[in-house]
Image (spheres, grey):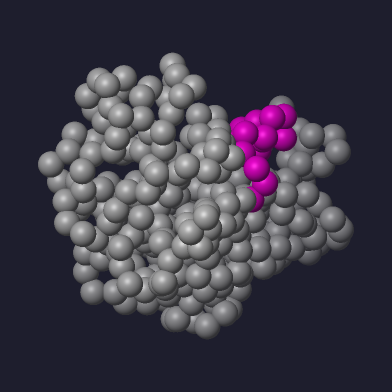
Amino acid sequence: MDSTVQILEENLERILKGEGLEVTEFDSVPEEVKPVTLRKSVCYIVGAVIFNSKDELLMVQEAKTECYGRWYLPAGRMEEHESILEALQREVKEEAGIDCQPITLLLVQEQGPKWVRFIFLAEETGGSLKTTAEADSESLQAQWWDRKSPLPLRASDILPLIDAGIKYRQNPWFPTLQPVDIPCPVICQRLFLTFISGDIDTSDEHRLWLLLSSNNATSHPSLPIAILVNAFDTIPRAAHRLVKECLPSSSINVHTCGILGVQHNGRIPGKTDGICFNMLVLLENSEDKSEISSPPPLEGDAYRWHEVSNHSLRAKIMQRIKEESVLPVHSPY
């Protein structure tokens, strides 16, 4: 096997496992690239869905003036120098009094690159519930909620998060996923962008291609990386933009399946506050799928198609696409 193809396949396997790769170059750059800065140009929020052995849910009573006395999941903003996991554990400790260990990232919510919320399914590992005697500016107290007794909620936006936690505990639909500690200066996404011949739902005989970048940043083939720049450039929109760049004349449907991995470091404020989302994306021709035997021709030389001939790797990619076994991402509004 060609050594460059071998390196590519090894990297693809890493991404499919939820691991990460260093970000060395950007491909779809609509504006001047500037590093993001936490709490200045971006805001990251962490939240926890935690159940005890009785299937009761951890809730905290708010101390903020605008929602005083109401209940919510333990959640809060990430601080400088923190990793995503450190922010989660700090917020749960401050607001609920308990120590926790994340089981998996459960979902990601975003409103463009300026506001991103990471929701974890986690478990209690120690500490004790915060009491009213320990009330402070973070919260008034914490309790386990049976989800049946009346409880005045701060907002109903947590109900889908709770449902997602219940669903994952009953039947995990994607592999457990934790953020990996790899620095990035901006918010971007590495696009695991696939094209499949034929109808994926009716045939077992498929050919599969990946879109690769032709930039010279690395000595081996790599997946394209698109930057999210302004407040309106959401995760799905960035993928559409890149596809439009290389396939401006094709009738292509772009389906953002979900997140395969999250890369973040945050140790150097203003330089490593960015996040790289490794995204699985499926391109589908809007015409009769059964007659499509190859991907649409690319315009320009910035990208190229690579057919995945490794049967094992192709099967893994197909499985993730068919079963949509990826971390969901969406806007909460």
Closer-to-camera residue (60/316): 316
Residue 3: % across, % down: 51, 63
Q: Residue furthest left?
A: 249
Magenta includes 176?
Answer: yes
Question: Would residue 242 appear left or right of 168 to someone viewing this image?
Answer: left
Q: Residue at x 52, y 74 (%)?
A: 183
Question: Which segment did they paint magenta?
Answer: 159-177
Q: Residue furthest top?
A: 202
Closer-to-camera residue (9/183): 9
Q: Residue at x 57, y 57 (%)?
A: 10
Question: Would residue 168 appear left or right of 308 to someone viewing this image?
Answer: right
Q: Residue at x 48, y 59 (%)?
A: 2
- How many numbered circles are shown? 0
Write down the quadrant of residue 23 in the picture.
Answer: bottom left
Magenta includes 127?
Answer: no
Write down the quadrant of residue 254 in the picture.
Answer: top left
Question: Would residue 115 appear left or right of 68 to someone viewing this image?
Answer: left
Write down the quadrant of residue 194 in the picture.
Answer: top left
Closer-to-camera residue (321/100): 321
Res. 105 in view: yes
Residue 215: % across, % down: 31, 68
